[in-house]
Image: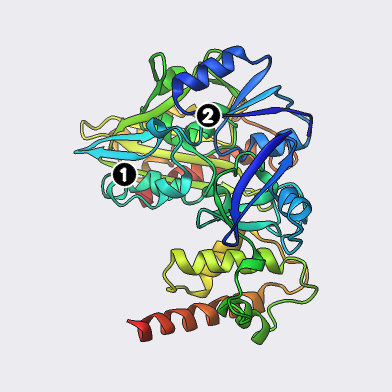
Amino acid sequence: MYETQYHRASSVQDAVSRMEAAGEGKYVSGGMTLIPTMKQRLAAPSDLIDLRHIAEMQGISVNGRSVRIGAATTHDEVASAAALKAVCPAICHLAGHIGDPHVRHMGTIGGSIANNDPAADYPAAVLALGATIVTNRREIAADDFFTGLFETALEDSEIITAITFDAPAKAAYQKFANPASRYAMAGVFVAKRDNGEVRVAVTGAGANGVFRQMDMEAALAANWSPDALATVSVDATDLLSDLHADAAYRANLVKVMAKRAVAAA
Amino acid sequence: MAKVTMTVNGRQVSGHCDDRTLLVQFIRENLGLTGTHVGCDTSQCGACVIHMDGKSVKSCSILAAQAAGSTITTIEGLAADGELHPVQAAFKANHGLQCGFCTPGMVMTAVDMIRRHQGQLDEATVRAELEGNICRCTGYHNIVKAILAAAAEMSGARVAAE
């Protein structure tokens, strides 16, 4: 790892000030992606600004069906939050299957979303739930947030402070994990609203990162059942092709995971 | 150089290290506690698992500076009064190790797993919970047996205490 200077931020404002004073700074939360990346010398921030101890970014609140998850909330905390499980068990299930138990004790929802790894699980949930990404400056709709591989709408020194959404009527997430890395080769989050609106978001498979599968949304809005997906064909054009799976294989996985998710919802 | 202070195995310790020093390096090199191992160094294998503020974490993927102020337990901190921790004893009784390299991480993982599941474990759960720990000798069979035996013994002891 190249040299770096560590700062522990006491508040969001403190973190922003430290970032603005830094040369090539990076925020770190759980660090479960960033620290291994720095160890491989694929990232070399001059300064690391630690967000893990900022009180206003912690915790989960559920008010009726309205959910707010602080950005520094760990995957383990999301997975085991009883109040959240009562209204949206799908996101708890998703969080409980990220990485391994040790990673879930450190990794955070804000970090995962800000990193926007094309095989990360959370972006699928955020997009399918139509969540709002709350930052220190503004609120960003999930549809406008994910802009490409490891790219988001976040500006320099902007910090995600929370994720908010209304719990759906039904939702589920299913992924096909790579047998070695356990990252999603295709992960599908389906969500149905009380008004009948359906959103389907796919991670792990898109060449440009997480995306919505509109044909599936239309089919499921008309008929919420795995069978409704039988006639939907998944276009492989913009899907990832690599040594783990080619685009056609991933296209099939997307369909299978979507069916399983609807069945599980 | 930063001065890092934390509580390790019940003792307050501090040391000077670069900000980029990994927690596992700090534990092994500054504190001389070499029971915590570095296996893969890429956060896959779990040989470096310790407890930070009561939760299992991979000490090769955390900076010592990030852990400053926390309470750490390493494998050296498990045995009390010269008696093996029930998980350590179960690994011994069930031959849950061969070369022993992954064992510190396995034991620390098992202690955390048993705590979170309050001793209510079955084989499938134990195997799923071992996602982040790799053993290249045993085929996991005796590790799973050891963890189940320890969980049964520890919940039995808890029931007796209640």
Percent of width and height locating residue A130: 36, 27
Which mark, residue A9? none
Count numbered badges in the picture: 2
Which coloring applies here?
rainbow
Q: Disc 1, disc 2: CB below 8 Å? A: no
Label 2: which secondary element: loop
Disc 1 packing (10 Å; few <14; some 14–19; many ≥20): many
Residue A96 left/right relative to A168: right
Under circle 1, the secondary element is loop
Disc 1 marks which residue? A88
Image position of A215 with respect to A76: above or below: above
For badge 2, the amino acid type reads Val
Task: Residue A150: give x, y in percent of width and height.
Answer: 61, 25
Q: Residue at x 51, y 17 (%)?
A: A16
Q: Residue at x 39, y 80 (%)?
A: B158
In the depicted view, which residue is nearer to us: A239 or B103? Answer: B103
The answer to whether dots 1 and 2 both sit on one chain is yes
Label 2 CA crowd tier, 10 Å (few <14, some 14–19, many 20+): many
In the picture, the quarter occupied by the N terminus of chain A is top right
Q: Vertical placement of A213 versus A108: above or below? A: above
Quarter residue B146 falls in: bottom right
Name the spot of residue A174 as percent of width and height, x first: 47, 47
* Chain designation of label 2: A
**Amino acid type at mark 1:** Cys
In the rendered view, would you say A156 is above or below A230? above
Residue A96 in sight here = yes
Disc nearer the start of the sequence (1/2): 1
Q: Which residue is mark 2?
A: A210
Q: Answer yes or no: is residue A246 visible.
A: no
Q: Is residue B144 left or right of residue A113?
A: right
